[in-house]
Image (tube, rainbow, N blue to C red):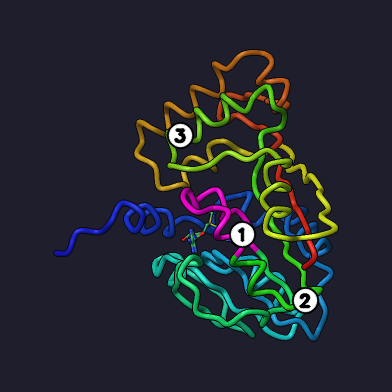
Amino acid sequence: MKKLSNKKHFWKKRSVKYDNLQWVNKQNYINAFIKAGEFKKSDIVLDVGTGTGVIAHAISSHVKEVIGLDISQDMLEHSNWHDNKYFIRRDLLNPIFKEEVFDKLTARMVFHHILKDTQKAMNECYRLLKKKGKMVLSEGVPPSIDVKEDYAKIFKLKEERLTFMPQDLHKLMKKAGFKNIKTEIVLMKHMSINNWIENSGLPENTQKTIYRMHIEAGDYFKRAYNMKVTDEDCYIDMQSAILVGTK
Ligand SMILES: C[S@@+](CC[C@H](N)C(=O)[O-])C[C@H]1O[C@@H](n2cnc3c(N)ncnc32)[C@H](O)[C@@H]1O
């Protein structure tokens, strides 16, 4: 059997339980994303790194059409949605569309996976948008700069990734040419760590280590995350940044 690359293997494992992740379907997060996008019935949207299509589905009734683009066949195959959407397996960094074809671009929790050529990927988003088109970018962020290092340490056990603060995302968009960039922070309260680690395709020993790192963390970390520990689980308030920029 052909050996899968590390990246393919990672998404193959993650795709199976991806839709069970609490943050993926968290309604206040999805609602804030939709509101930020100010979608119109005439919009043709490209959802970059669509994964299982949760965002593509959420915005589909607000727009004319959504095209979901993703590098992982496994993530796309786990999509449960089949309305006004089309899915394409492709790396964002390997362009197929000509410039200025989309009214809006959406990218939720994708850019931290683009380790190399991150700016080039953002420039590509800019290129694909029509003039006056909008990009809605969202990433999970540490609740404060004081816990950024701990945040990166925990996530390093889970995946190879970038850690952004909201201002890093702003810079990325500004450098690509986006104007009138607005940032909003969405709070997802009382999120289960067990739900997160059990549905992330991680080996059991890594799950245990990540759980321990939370409950044994310093007081400053627990405070920043408003952590609550019970006999069964550990709960934190998660934060995501949503940025909207105009071409
Ligand atoms: C955490 S998932 C987010 C999925 C979806 N946007 C959501 O909010 O549920 C990240 C997705 O980005 C995709 N991805 C990562 N790098 C990519 C690239 N260079 N081009 C296209 N998709 C990419 C992955 O395959 C994965 O499906």
Whole-percent x, y for residue 176 in the image = 67, 58
Q: Marks 2 and 3: in contact by CB < 8 Å?
A: no
Whole-percent x, y for residue 98 in the image = 58, 82
Numbered mark located on residue 131 in the image:
2
| Secondary structure of residue under mark 2 | strand
Q: Is residue 245 left or right of residue 58?
A: right
Q: Is residue 200 left or right of residue 53?
A: left
Q: Which mark is in front, 3 or 1? A: 1
The quarter of the rendered structure image containing the N terminus is bottom left
Whole-percent x, y for residue 203 in the image = 34, 39
Q: Residues within 10 Å of mark 1 (few under 14, many from 20)?
A: many
Position of residue 151 relative to residue 8, above or below, is: above
Residue 115 belongs to magenta span? yes
Look at label 2 and name its amino acid: Lys
Q: Residues within 10 Å of mark 2 (few under 14, many from 20)?
A: some
Which residue appears at 25% of the width and 59% of the height? 4
In the rendered image, which residue does mark 1 sit on? 122
Q: Nearer the viewer, residue 123 or 243?
A: 123
Q: Which mark is in front, 3 or 2? A: 2
In the rendered image, which residue does mark 3 sit on? 156
Q: Which residues are magenta?
A: 107-123
Numbered mark located on residue 51 in the image:
none
Position of residue 84 relative to residue 208, above or below, is: below
Which residue appears at 73% of the width and 41% of the height? 167
Position of residue 116 relative to residue 158, above or below, is: below
Alpha carbon separation for disc pair 3 and 2: 38 Å
Q: Marks 1 and 3: in contact by CB < 8 Å?
A: no
Whole-percent x, y for residue 143 in the image = 71, 32
Alpha carbon separation for disc pair 2 and 1: 16 Å
User: Nearer the N terminus, badge 3 or badge 2?
Assistant: 2
User: Nearer the N terminus, badge 3 or badge 1?
Assistant: 1
The quarter of the rendered structure image containing the C terminus is bottom right
